[in-house]
Image: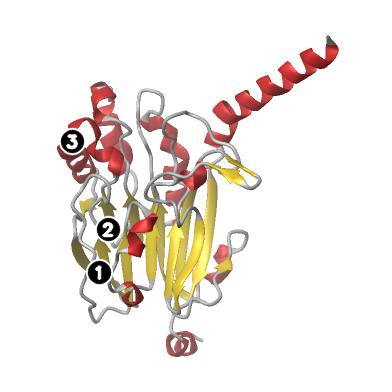
Amino acid sequence: MYIILGILFLIFCLIFYMVFVEPRRLKEKHYFIKKNKKKVLDISNAFDLYGQDSNIIICHLSDFHFSRSFKPQRINRVIRSIMDVAPDLIVFTGDLIDNYEKWPTKETQRLIEKLNKMTAPMGKIAILGNHDYRGEGYYFVKEVLSQGGFTVLENEEIFGSNDDVSINIAGMDDCLNGEPQFRFERTLAEWHLLLVHEPDAVLDTENIKDFDLILAGHSHGGQIRLPFLFYKIKGSLTYTHGLYLLAKKTLLSISNGIGTSMLPVRFGVPPEIIYYHLAKSPAEAKQKK
């Protein structure tokens, strides 16, 4: 009898943790990235020490999946993180809304207000994910992102720069429900970024070696990840989570995202916000010293 009660108690604790604890354990990651990607440094515990060595900080957000159970106030910690780090650029790689058909419209204005509280001097760029098309939500999501200060890219490129660096960002339309384009022209920018929702989109991208950094989401890292066992979904069957070196100078980074899908649970893959500190060229770094 006591054994059965003990097992039931452990099951209850596990479910409680998966529903109420881990989905709220937002992790903040920081990567220091050089043009040569052979060595990427995780500087999460000392990112402030690399301020003199980088000339741009990019904030990567993905997969909010706002819904009746995941309301705009749930991203207050994300907003505080952005305020503290003060990135130069913010990018969002899709799935703003979980399902437009079930979206509580009274939360729309609050969502726009939360998005507007995320600020960056070089702007905010977004692409759409497969869930943004669900329930005919395409136009709604684009409008909310636009009113929230984001520029939405659909098979488009945008150029930006500050006093120290130039960057070109290409945004691919969603591969499952949109009409993606798999080739983008290289420019004279110092850094080239590609935003995709599904990480497996890189398998069809023609000029993959032209990009320095490819940012994706969609997989949620599996959302429930046990040792040697986790759920894979279409669009992230090959590339599932973390960092992948696709070519000598091409790095793919997949975010675990912020929200959840299908079930409001997480285990082994807490939500995350990722910051990329792009390194100065050796000549720039030498001049600054």
Query: Is 235 on the left-hand or right-hand side of 238?
Result: left
Q: Secondary structure at mark 1?
A: strand
Name the spot of residue 205 as percent of width and height, x first: 29, 66
In the drawing, what numbered circle is on residue 140?
A: 3
Name the spot of residue 250 as percent of width and height, x first: 41, 73
Whole-angstrom CA distance, mark 1 to mark 2, is 9 Å
Q: Are marks 1 and 2 in contact (CB under 8 Å)?
A: yes
Mark 1 burial class by Cα count in 10 Å: few <14, some 14-19, many 20+: few
Q: Secondary structure at mark 2?
A: loop
Establish if 115 lies above or below 46: above
Residue on which disc 1 sits = 160
In the drawing, what numbered circle is on residue 277?
A: none
Residue 119 appears in the picture as rendered: no
Name the residue at 58% across, 35% down: 22
Name the spot of residue 209 as percent of width and height, x first: 35, 76
Q: Are marks 1 and 3 in contact (CB under 8 Å)?
A: no
Q: Amino acid type of disc 3?
A: Phe
| Camera-side mark, 2 or 3 | 3
Mark 2 burial class by Cα count in 10 Å: few <14, some 14-19, many 20+: some
Residue on which disc 2 sits = 123
Q: Amino acid type of disc 2?
A: Gly
| Camera-side mark, 1 or 3 | 3
Name the residue at 22% across, 70% down: 184
Establish if 64 lies above or below 284: above
Query: Is 98 on the left-hand or right-hand side of 51?
Result: left
- In which quadrant of the rendered view does residue 131 lie? top left
161 or 213, nearer to the observer: 213
